[in-house]
Image (cartoon, grey):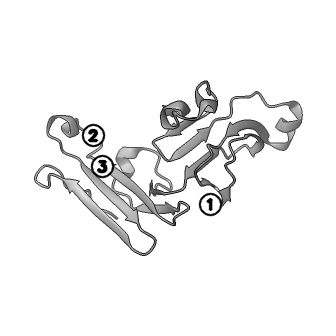
Amino acid sequence: MRPMWLEFPDDDAFTATETQFMLGDSMLVAPKIKTPTDFHNSLGLQEVDYQLPSGSTWYNYYSKKVEGANGNLVTRNVPDLEQVVYIKGGSVLPILLHDNCFALKKCIANKIKLEVYLDSDSKATGTLYTDDGVSFKHETDKAYAVTSFSWDGTNFNSSRSSDASKYSFPDSQ
């Protein structure tokens, strides 16, 4: 988690923002922090204020649609089972498929899907960090792997950087 000003240091609008944050460099989250009014509560909604940084394409995580990022404050009524989450264009987001699996240790070997969110040049990059999820060998023995992904508008590429003698990917189902 990072404060907005850390990811967007040149945007004065985010120097004092405390109601939203970045998860990594691609995911913007604006949590529900307001107490819902009785009216909103009766509809199963909650009001959330947030601001999308200008100069980037932003995708609503749930609808996968591009939403304007003019830098203005937005107020939205959000359903109970949804959050305000946006993905920055130009990102490849690895998603661990974990239906009916609530503990990372039990689903670490599950399949991973990649969601590609294009920037204005129709390009995207991202990384996936993996380790055994149990030990501290990633610190003591450098037993981890980083896989990089890129879409250049025509081709999708991936490359893995790790010490193969110290780490191997878990078997996928």
For marks 1 and 2 on the same chain, the one whose residue lies earlier in the sequence: 1
Circle nearer the viewer, 3 or 1: 1
Question: What is the three-letter code of the residue carrying label 3?
Answer: Thr
Q: Name the residue nearer the viewer: 132 or 88.
A: 88
| Image quadrant occupied by the C terminus | bottom left
Q: Is residue 111 above or below residue 56?
A: below
Mark 2 crowd level (few <14, some 14–19, many ≥20, 10 Å Cα): few
Q: Is residue 125 above or below residue 19?
A: below
Q: Quadrant of residue 57?
A: bottom right
Which residue is at 38% across, 58% downward? Answer: 110
Q: CA distance from mark 3 to mark 1?
A: 26 Å
Question: What is the three-letter code of the residue carrying label 1?
Answer: Lys
Q: Mark 1 falls on what kind of element? A: loop
Residue denoted by label 2: 134
For marks 3 and 1 on the same chain, the one whose residue lies earlier in the sequence: 1
Q: Name the residue nearer the viewer: 72 or 106.
A: 72
Which residue is at 67% across, 49% downward? Answer: 69
Q: Is residue 5 left or right of residue 67?
A: left
Mark 1 crowd level (few <14, some 14–19, many ≥20, 10 Å Cα): some
